[in-house]
Image (spheres, rainbow, N blue to C red):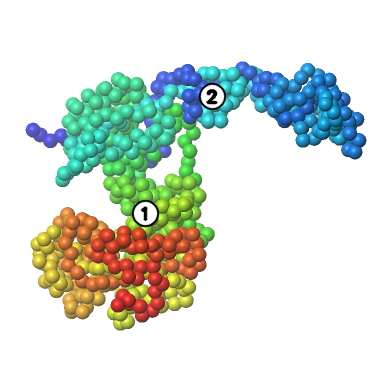
Amino acid sequence: MSSHKRNVYLKTIPIPEAVEKARTALDRDMLIRSVFVPVHEAAGRVLSEAVFARFSSPTFHSAAMDGYAVNAKTTFGAREGSPFELIEDRDCFAVNTGNPLPDGCDAVIMIENVTRAGDNAIAIEAPAFPWQHVRRIGEDIVATELLFPQNHRISPYDIGALLSAGIWDVYVWEPVRIAIIPTGDEVLDFTKRPTPKAGQVVESNSQVLAALARQHGCEVRRIPPVADKPEELQNAVRDCLASDAHIVIICAGSSAGSKDFTRSTMEAFGEVLVHGISAMPGKPSLLGVCKGKLVAGAPGYPVSAVVCFEELLAPLICWLGRQDHQARKTVPVELTRKAPSKLGVEEFLRLSVGKVDDKYVATPLARGAGCITSVSKAQALTRIPVQSEGLEQGGTVPAELMVPEAELDNILVCVGSHDNTLDILADELMGFTPPIRLTSSHVGSMGGILAIKSGSCHFAGAHLFDPDTGDYNFPFLQRYLPDAEITLVNLAIRHQGFIVPKGNPKGIRSIHDLADGSIRFLNRQRGAGTRILFDHHLRDAEINPTQVAGYDKEEFTHMAVAVNVLTGAADTGLGIYAAARALGLDFVPLARERYDLIIPNRFMDTAGAQAVMRLLASPTFHARIEALGGYETTLTGRTMQPGTGLGD
């Protein structure tokens, strides 16, 4: 059986042009119809025609206060110090808030401003004026006036106005209905709670897109995953086009692979308008019109699928449903790390953001199109322009907030060395009231010190060993931050060593085993404390780095090193015991080291730093650290001094 031919991309186009192509090709008035719904069920819906009031509100003159209704002109003789008497049920009438005014009355005197003057009389010392404390007919709504124009989105408060005006039903645009078709031989139906094998993935894109669509008021239906067979995909699309769906989204199969059938399927039922946008991630996105309906091909990588939805489909959904497409709030952020980019495409870069002093600082998150956590961990995104080669560390760029701005005030920014205990710290901080979110950027211990120097974080994690003094971190702080007012607090003592596959098939026992170049080693990035530790042991063993195969290959975290060993991409790498244990790998010990938090003194009295200090003093927190394996908590929570070493 011959393989299916590969697709050929049309010329990629800018995102606004792609959206406009779809708008021009769709007949919105024919696609989205007006429907009649009860007012009490209409919140969030968009009016398809104007609404005019049937009743006034209130429909009668009513008392706005508890007291006595009067004709104001009969009270003009009242003066302070000279009480004026009114006879009940003749000159004045007792009323409660909301009661209709008795005939002939045009004012209400508050109950607090009257005194008794006998069994059936009251006394006042100030005159009333006309319409005092009275809600007049139509004060809020006047019958026949315009309540809401067409294409107004009905809020919960609007429900009260509509019912008060005697409106029981309204015409609204029907919700945009979407059918989502996941595709691929490798995807497993999440509803069956499967365990993926090599080459398989749990299908999740449909649910991310469905949740995003529901935020825009859409009704969503998901089709069970369809295999990479043209006839099966065509059958699924045919059924969806015959249904009441306005939009059909095909997940995956939009690129140029031999099993990518989205484009050919769209062409079988209609016209392809767009195949390829000038964006990264999201480039392979497809838009077409089939039988009058919008059909989209969302790329298979999750972040690309999100870009396809947010940049192409969300504006089109809002346009179809007559809603405003709300732009995210934009704030200036200072980058903690350089972000190179390719010319010719607009890149969407997710950011972890927090407020440090009076500025927002942002750390670029993982940029792979398959890294859904780069979206779930992000507080903002920035757009790298088409003609830019990237963003510089320390530069200020506009960032679109993905969370409320107030949430950034409760974010602690940690920059520096990676450690698994930071995950426990982050979890515990979220248990505070209000919750405190920890964002950590893994740029190595030296990167953390430089972030402290530039004022780009609240604290940094470091484990820099100085062989000349046998001490940790202080010699480096004295060299790079000699005048800084900082406090060092120990997080844990941890065990570093060689992470190796289960059973240690290469028989690695010491650093000397790396000297002949037969072991594929995976290093940490320059400036990382783990790399500095490794270089120290190489010097002690009189091994030249050029003798180590893979010395120039770098990763940014202990878990990344462990994953590479697990998958066979490397034979070993230096890392912490907890990372090896987490993935069921073996471990060859090399050294114990001290991992400290470097906290500028100006932050020590803040709520975030105080929460961290309370946790570091907690026996429960100590127990969670020790449960990871390869950690000691004998110094945890203690303020470090020069010469403390490992406290032995």
Label 1: few (<14), some or many (≥20) within 10 Å? Answer: some
Residue that sits furthest to the left in the current view: 1
Q: Is residue 602 visible?
A: yes
What x and y, as percent, mark residue 391? 40, 57
* Amino acid type of the residue that numbered disc 2 sits on in the rendered structure: Gln
From the top left corner, tell me how far across and down residue 625 is, in percent.
Answer: 31, 61
Mark 1, secondary structure of its residue: helix
**Quick one: SS at disc 2?**
loop
Residue at 24% over, 28% down: 265
Quadrant of residue 242 within the rendered picture: top left
Which residue is identified by label 1? 427
Vertical arrangement, residue 105 with respect to residue 125, above or below = above
Q: Nearer the viewer, residue 596 or 573?
A: 596
Q: What is the CA distance from the residue labelled 1 to the residue labelled 2?
A: 47 Å
**Would you place residue 330 above or below residue 311 in this image?**
below
Residue 304: x, y in percent?
A: 31, 43
Q: Which mark is residue 150?
A: 2
Q: Earlier in the sequence, mark 1 or mark 2?
A: 2
Residue 188 is situated, as x and y percent measured from the top left of the image, at 21, 37
Residue 475 in view? no
Nearest to the observer: residue 299 or residue 428: 428
Image quadrant containing the N terminus: top left
Residue ID at (17%, 59%): 585
> Which quadrant of the figure contains the C terminus?
bottom left
Residue 465 — which label?
Answer: none
Give the residue at x 48% y 57%: 355
Q: Residues within 10 Å of mark 2 (few under 14, many from 20)?
A: some
**Nearest to the observer: residue 125 or residue 511:** 125
Residue 65: name its quadrant.
Answer: top right
Q: Amino acid at mark 1?
A: Asp
Seen at 89% across and 34% down, the residue is: 83
